[in-house]
């Protein structure tokens, strides 16, 4: 009687590809918020919501800056997890997140003052 021997195989485990859907959705909502804020800056005061126009565009810019900071921060974190070192793309995304947050804080201060 013959015996069948099975060869041992070395399995390579790979990390699953990460989806960036959340980051894209947050970024697109941030672009829309910035667009609405820019549009509200030029809305005439005799419009039926004209009284709200005075401060809303600043609020929209603050919201857009926070959304951009979140999206760029999540992109940077995902890329850092993939690369495991600080590469150029991780540094660029982190810098964009910090700049977006600084813009949101600046518009927030203007809005308050």
Image (cartoon, rainbow, N blue to C red):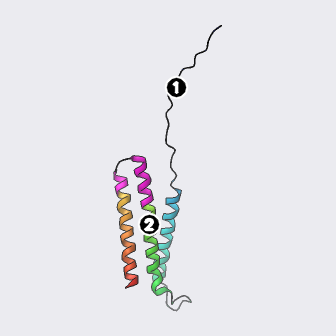
Position of residue 46 relative to residue 39, above or below, is below
Quadrant position of residue 103: bottom left
* Direction from residue 100 to residue 27 in the image, left or right: right
Position of residue 76 measured from the top left corner of the image (x, y, whole percent): 41, 56
Residue closest to the eye, 75 or 84: 84
| Residue 14 colored in magenta in the image | no
Position of residue 22 measured from the top left corner of the image (x, y, whole percent): 52, 59
State the residue at coordinates (51%, 71%).
Answer: 32
State the residue at coordinates (57%, 19%).
Answer: 6
Label 2: which secondary element: helix
For the C terminus, the image quarter is bottom left
Position of residue 3 measured from the top left corner of the image (x, y, whole percent): 62, 12
Q: Say few, some or many: other residues with alpha carbon within 10 Å of mark 2 (under 14 / 14 to 19 / 20 or more).
A: many
Quadrant position of residue 110: bottom left
Position of residue 73 relative to residue 12, above or below, is below
Label 1: which secondary element: loop
Q: Which residues are magenta?
A: 73-91
* Direction from residue 90 to residue 23 in the image, left or right: right
**Label 2 belongs to which residue?**
68
State the residue at coordinates (50%, 49%).
Answer: 18
Position of residue 75 relative to residue 46, above or below, is above
**Label 1 belongs to which residue?**
9
Q: Say few, some or many: other residues with alpha carbon within 10 Å of mark 1 (under 14 / 14 to 19 / 20 or more).
A: few
């Amino acid at each position: 009687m013959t015996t069948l021997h099975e060869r041992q195989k070395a399995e390579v485990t790979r990390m699953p590809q990460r989806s960036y859907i959340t980051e894209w959705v947050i970024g697109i909502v941030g672009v829309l918020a910035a667009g609405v804020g820019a549009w509200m800056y030029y809305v005439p005061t005799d419009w039926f919501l004209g009284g709200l126009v005075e401060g809303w565009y600043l609020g929209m810019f603050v919201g857009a800056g926070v959304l951009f900071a979140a999206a760029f921060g999540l992109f940077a974190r995902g890329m850092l997890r993939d690369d495991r070192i600080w590469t150029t793309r991780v540094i660029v995304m982190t810098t964009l997140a910090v700049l977006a947050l600084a813009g949101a804080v600046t518009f927030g201060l203007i809005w308050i003052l």
